[in-house]
Image: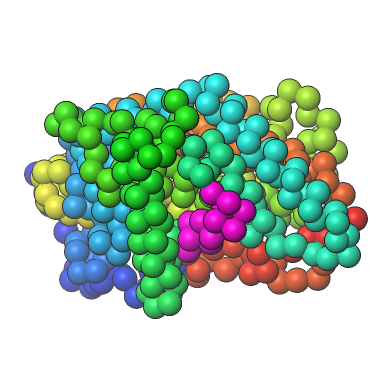
Amino acid sequence: MPTLKNPPSVWTDGTLPLLAQGYAWLPDRMRASPDGTVRTRLLGRRTVALRGPEAVAFFYDEQHVQRRAALPDPVLDTLFGQGAVHTLDGLAHRVRKSMFLSLLKDEKGIESLREHVLLRWREAVGRWRQEPEASVVLFDEAARVLALAVCDWTGVPVTGAGGAQLARDCVAMVDGFATAGPRHLRARHARKRQEEALGHLIVRVREQRETAPDGSALDVVARHHDADGALLDPHAAAVELLNIIRPTVAIAWFVTFAAHALHRWPEHRGPLRGDASGHLATVFAHEVRRFYPFAPFVGGLAARDVQWRGEKVPAGTLLLLDLYGQHHDPQLWAHPYRFDPHRYGTGESLRNLIPQGGGETAEGHRCPGEDVTVTLLAALVTELAGLDVSVPDQDLTIPLSRMPTLPRSGFRIRLA
């Protein structure tokens, strides 16, 4: 069995080019690869990057790829948290993930969260109407709305000021995980601050000094027993509670991209306003998640010596699944650089849509909050389409060199 072989230059470390090129780095390398596989190094580690339906099936097979020890400390210390479900495999992963599935795959629970979000959104719009000449930064407002709403839903008590701080901290965690310097330091401080606060809250709930609503995320996480039969320690419980709150706040990126899409292609506003079934809002949300850049790729380690297309990949090799490139691959999507919500008329398109991972949610590492993301984004797309707003002159450039990216202005709007 041949091993993946390339001239030494192919294995040159790609960390600095990745930081410089951002989302374009891996797709550019893929286009230059004759066999659709990229060999490089990241942070000195031998790395193989894959793309396509075959790669998705390969990557999400735990016999091939494991997550334990795959995520570097800088990512854990900012985005996911040390000891998070993302770092587990096998039975430990399934038992921990069952806690998330019970909360994030429940239709009534998702609908309840949607109602909380719409209530907080409409409160925010009412506040904007009190200053009709002022513009607001949609990204900041959406993050605050989502932070307050998800705390209402999880049972985590916050005030208005506390919700604003939580929103800023969750944004910082996402914004700083893939970079160095001040953004990364802000992310570390934000995570530490929120983990400490939620850890103390978990302890108070267990000691019955704080009430957690029955069945709420706070209640479920505080009572969860891991595969070893033990309660999560307070830090781990705080990490996982934050792994419900932080991704919900991160939907602010997609909300901002949705507003950008409605501004560029305003012909969608009218149909969305008349979308009684919600179908158009849902496919619009899917297209926002495909078209706009959020996660560039996901990573894991070869669990053992494995084969990829007949070649040997040694155990411990870092494996990347190219998300952004897959979503713009002309072999998978007709006119991939055209924003077209109507492309989702077949199940095949949805199977190729992997912004929050691929494979099966219950058994694998696909994000259990994907249904929440689509539901909340579709709801807020409908709200955005129904608002009469003007978009002041501003820099709406979306730089692909920055990860995660966003319109430079945060997308300022003014109620008309």
Apparent side of residue 176 relative to residue 413 in the rendered image (left or right): left
Rendered residue at 69%/27% (across/down): 279
Rendered residue at 78%/25% (across/down): 276
The boundaries of the magenta stretch are 158-172
The N terminus - image quarter = top left
**Spot occupied by residue 139 in the image (x, y as percentages of width and height):** 64, 58
The reply to whether residue 321 is visible in this rendering is no
Rendered residue at 30%/64% (across/down): 74
Q: Give yes or no for residue 81 being in the magenta stretch.
A: no
Front residue of 40 and 44: 44
Front residue of 317 and 11: 317
Q: Give yes or no for residue 161 being in the magenta stretch.
A: yes
Apparent side of residue 210 relative to residue 143 in the rendered image (left or right): left
Q: Is residue 184 above or below residue 71?
A: below
**Spot occupied by residue 318 in the image (x, y as percentages of width and height):** 22, 55
The reply to whether residue 270 is visible in this rendering is yes
- Give the dominant element type of the magenta stretch: helix, strand or loop: helix
Apparent side of residue 80 relative to residue 349 in the rendered image (left or right): left
User: How many numbered circles does the render carry?
Assistant: 0
**Spot occupied by residue 137 in the image (x, y as percentages of width and height):** 70, 63
Apparent side of residue 403 relative to residue 141 in the rendered image (left or right): left
What is the residue that sits farthest to the front in this orientation? 209
What is the residue that sits farthest to the bottom in this orientation? 181
Rendered residue at 88%/60% (across/down): 132
Q: Is residue 97 above or below residue 177?
A: above
Front residue of 59 and 82: 82
**Spot occupied by residue 298 in the image (x, y as percentages of width and height):** 35, 50
